[in-house]
Every structure is written in structure tokens, then in C-alpha cells.
């Protein structure tokens, strides 16, 4: 079966010469939820920006459901890969929630009733339908993060890429977002430092460190491999030990 | 000057003035201003009519007059200028409360005061009865170029974000014992302004990335 995300030997150096990725291999299959872990500066964001063609591979290749990420395919690639950025104030730039959620589908050429239906469907999936005519800056931070997820759901992506989805959320909003992500029937790649969140939501984890994939396995196994964790500056929060809880069934 | 603080100027309501189409309100405001400015300054009766017209619109809109009056403070710098005029203008002199002032200056000052106040009141009424979003749609319907409307809508969207950043920087400065008391402290304020500019610029870049990620190709979808 063709993987939803097929990254092969991806290397990239920024124009200033700083090399961020040194041959990354990553496959994500349909319906999987995968956590992308790694210390600051490991190249996680750089990798994410390759997935929808904002950055172009220096070497290697990226393909989404068999379609290579190339200039000619960018419109379709950006429909297939929905990236939710970390700061919802960057993601929500229109005057109303409706215009914002409609921005992506409208760029795909969808208009009128169908556009409206898409917007409402996306907002229902994150439980924000009653805020459709509000300006984004009048919403709470947690609500803005949920609308940010809706903005890409409206494009009916094949894979949802989330950059630090739980950052700056209070515990209740964090749990609400987890419930939403679990309820979505979509492939997810989630960049995060929040290891308990990764364990809760993603059966599989990948560690990116120094620009390469250094581990790829079940989240439980990755988080309980002390030597591996220590080597890549990953630490569990105080008092949290996956071994003390029932092993999640993958 | 109203657009800058759109939402704090807006007074929620459902009066006929609130419901009146935004683009017609903008045209009405423009026409009113042109007529007020073009009226010769000694047609006192005309100004009374204008004032009655604007107050009756305010009455229908049910926006509390004190709400609008408090916001007319934006006019103060112009008032200072109007007050100065009788003293600095030349020409025939006249006595007011025992002080010799210029006749022309006095008339010009009063005219500036009257016309300015009418204009500010009318603009505030538009701002109070129209949501910023509707104002933008109105401008769009009046065929203002897309780019200008887009720039204004980004301004409305990010005004809060940027003011909040500015407030946080101020809190951070003051938490470390800094308050701007005299001109020697201005370089610090200037550097803060520079930092704010760079932060906003970087945010602009991140917003652009987010737009590209959702299929933006240089034209706003319609």
C-alpha cells in the first residue's frame, strides 16, 4: 500500500549554510497517529516545512500518497497535507472564523453553498460551530487552537500535521483537544515536546535528533528506553512513568 | 482615526442606524463631511441644522451620548490649534473679555472647532454603529481596491495582537525598574519600538507561511 507520507533520504541546508536535515527516512501509513519527538534544534520544523513544499528538498524526496512534492503539484500537495502551526494567531489571519476556515477550500476553488457546508462541517468536528461569525481575536487561546485545526480540516487533508498542539493550553483545553484529535478519522503527524500527550494520542513515535531519525517504534517502547531518551535530551516530566500504567494496546 | 480602535469604538445595538447598509453609511458620512467643510463659516443657521441632523441620527441609533462624547477626546490637539488661532493670526483686532485678539483668527478658530466637532461626531457615530468587518465589506462594495481592503483587514485582525505585545514589553521593562521619565530614557523606548517592529515583521512572515500552506497563490479567494 502506498504510504500517506513517504520521506526518503531527505537532506536540507538553509541558504546561510546551516545544515538542518541529514537524510531523513519516514513513512506514515493511512490512519496512523505518529508523534515526532526530538530536542530543540533537531530539525523538526524544517521537516514539517518540507511536507507541504514550503521548503524544497536539497536531496532526497517527499511524496504524499504517491504524489511527489514538486512545484507542479503544490496546490494538490497543500490540500493533502494540512499543517497546523504552533501560534494560532499566525494561522488565523482573516477577520472572521468563517472567512478563515473557508480560506483554504476557497483557494481550491470551492464556492457558495458547498464552501459554507465545508466550513460548518470542519467547525462541527472541533465543536466550534457556534463561533462561526466571531472574529478570531475575540476567542480564548484554546478555542483559537481548535479553529486553527478546523482551518485545515476544511481542506479535507489526507494527513494532519500539528506543530506543538498542546503548547500554552490549560489542562482542560489540552484534554478537549486530545478528545477532538482522537475523534478525527484522519492520519496525524504530531510534533511535540509533551511526552505524556504523545503517549496518550500516538501509538507510534519517531525521534528526530541532529537532523536524522534515530528511533522509530511504539511510543511506549521509545519513552521507556532510558539510554535512548537520555542520549537525545528527552526527559519525562517529574512523576510521570509510562511503566506504572497499563501498556496501551496499539 | 476611528478604524484604528474599531472594536472599542463599536457600541453593540440593533437600531435602524446599526442595520443600515455599511457602504451607504460610508457614503453618507463622506457627503456630510464635504457639505460641512464646504459651508461658508458665517452661515450659522446651517451649522445648527447639521448639529440637529447628527444628534437625531445618534438619537435613533440609541448609542448613549456620553459614550460618544468621551471618545471625542481625539479632537483635543485640533482644539488647541483652534484656541491658538485668534492669538497668532493677523489683521483687524477685536476685544474678547478684555483681551485683544485677531478678528479673522477668532472666526477661523470657531469655524475649525464647529466643523471639526461635527466631523468627529459623525465619524464616531459610524464607528459606533458599524462592526469593523462590515465597514471593510462596505469599502469593498464601494470598489475600493482589493489590496487596500486586505491591508485594512489585516490591520483590524492584528491590532490586538500587536498592542498586546507592546503591553507585555512595557510590563517587562517596568518589572526591571524602568519607567520613561525624561528624554534620556527615550533611546530605550526607541529600541523597544524597533523590537516590536521586528517581531511584527517576523509574524508577518509566519502568517505568510500559514497562508501558503493553505494554498494561497497571491490572490485572495473570492
Image (cartoon, coloured by chain):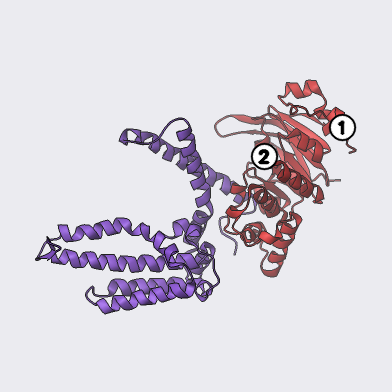
Tell me, for residue A167, which label it has, or none: 2
Looking at the image, residue A225 lies above or below residue A11 = above
Q: Locate residue B186, reporting x and y percent.
A: 35, 36
Mark nearer the N terminus (2 vs 1): 2
Q: Locate residue A155, reporting x and y percent.
A: 71, 56
Residue A33, can we see it? yes
Image mark 2: chain: A
Looking at the image, residue A84 lies above or below residue A216 = below
Mark 1 Cα within 10 Å, few/some/many (few <14, many 20+)?
few
Q: Locate residue B211, reporting x and y percent.
A: 60, 51
For the colour red, the matching chain is A
Query: Could you tell whether A21 is left or right of B45 in the image?
Result: right
Q: Nearer the viewer, residue B73 or A35?
A: B73
Tell me, for residue A245, which label it has, or none: 1
**For numbered disc 1, what is the local secondary structure?**
loop
Query: Could you tell whether B120 is left or right of A219 in the image?
Result: left
**For numbered disc 2, what is the local secondary structure?**
loop
Query: Could you tell whether A212 is left or right of B138 in the image?
Result: right
Between the C-alphas of marks 2 and 1, the distance is: 24 Å
Query: Which-is-in-front pick, marks 2 and 1?
Result: 1
For the colour purple, the matching chain is B
Amino acid at each position: 500500500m502506498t504510504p500517506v507520507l513517504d520521506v526518503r533520504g531527505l537532506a536540507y541546508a538553509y541558504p546561510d549554510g546551516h545544515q538542518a536535515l541529514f537524510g531523513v527516512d519516514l513513512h506514515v501509513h493511512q490512519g496512523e497517529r505518529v508523534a515526532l519527538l526530538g530536542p530543540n534544534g533537531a530539525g523538526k520544523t524544517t521537516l514539517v516545512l518540507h511536507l507541504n513544499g514550503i521548503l524544497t528538498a536539497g536531496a532526497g524526496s517527499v511524496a504524499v500518497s504517491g504524489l511527489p512534492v514538486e512545484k507542479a503539484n503544490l496546490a494538490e500537495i497543500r490540500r493533502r497535507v494540512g499543517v497546523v502551526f504552533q501560534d494560532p494567531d499566525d494561522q488565523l489571519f482573516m477577520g472572521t472564523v468563517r472567512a478563515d476556515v473557508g480560506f483554504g477550500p476557497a483557494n481550491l476553488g470551492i464556492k457558495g453553498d458547498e464552501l459554507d457546508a465545508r466550513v460548518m462541517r470542519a467547525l462541527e468536528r472541533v465543536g466550534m460551530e457556534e463561533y462561526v461569525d466571531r472574529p478570531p481575536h475575540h476567542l480564548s487561546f484554546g478555542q483559537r487552537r481548535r479553529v486553527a485545526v478546523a482551518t485545515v480540516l476544511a481542506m479535507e487533508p489526507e494527513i494532519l500535521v500539528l506543530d506543538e498542539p498542546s503548547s500554552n493550553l490549560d489542562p482542560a483545553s489540552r484534554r478537549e483537544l486530545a478528545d477532538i484529535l482522537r475523534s478525527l478519522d484522519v492520519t496525524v503527524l504530531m510534533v511535540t515536546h509533551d511526552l505524556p500527550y504523545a503517549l496518550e494520542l500516538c501509538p507510534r513515535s519517531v525521534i528526530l535528533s541532529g537532523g536524522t531519525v534515530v528511533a522509530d517504534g511504539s511510543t511506549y517502547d521509545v519513552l521507556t528506553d532510558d539510554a535512548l531518551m537520555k542520549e537525545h535530551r528527552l526527559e519525562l516530566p517529574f512523576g510521570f512513568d509510562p511503566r506504572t500504567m497499563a501498556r496501551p494496546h496499539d | 482615526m476611528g478604524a484604528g480602535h474599531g472594536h472599542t469604538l463599536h457600541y453593540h445595538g440593533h437600531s435602524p442606524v446599526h442595520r443600515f447598509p455599511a457602504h451607504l453609511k460610508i457614503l453618507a458620512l463622506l457627503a456630510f463631511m464635504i457639505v460641512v467643510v464646504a459651508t461658508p463659516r458665517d452661515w450659522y443657521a446651517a451649522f445648527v441644522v447639521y448639529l440637529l441632523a447628527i444628534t437625531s441620527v445618534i438619537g435613533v441609533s440609541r448609542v448613549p451620548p456620553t459614550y460618544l462624547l468621551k471618545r471625542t477626546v481625539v479632537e483635543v490637539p485640533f482644539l488647541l490649534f483652534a484656541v491658538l488661532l485668534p492669538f497668532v493670526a493677523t489683521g483687524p483686532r477685536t476685544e474678547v473679555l478684555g483681551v485683544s485678539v485677531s478678528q479673522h483668527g477668532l472666526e477661523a478658530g470657531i469655524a475649525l472647532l464647529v466643523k471639526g466637532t461635527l466631523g468627529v461626531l459623525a465619524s464616531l457615530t459610524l464607528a459606533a454603529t458599524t462592526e469593523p468587518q462590515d465597514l471593510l465589506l462596505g469599502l469593498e462594495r464601494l470598489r475600493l481596491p482589493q489590496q487596500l481592503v486586505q491591508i485594512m483587514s489585516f490591520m483590524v485582525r492584528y491590532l490586538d495582537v500587536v498592542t498586546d505585545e507592546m503591553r507585555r514589553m512595557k510590563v517587562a521593562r517596568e518589572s526591571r525598574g524602568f519607567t520613561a521619565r525624561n528624554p534620556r530614557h527615550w533611546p530605550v523606548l526607541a529600541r523597544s519600538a524597533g523590537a516590536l517592529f521586528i517581531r511584527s515583521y517576523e509574524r508577518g512572515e509566519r502568517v505568510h507561511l500559514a497562508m501558503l500552506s493553505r494554498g494561497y497563490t497571491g490572490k485572495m479567494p473570492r
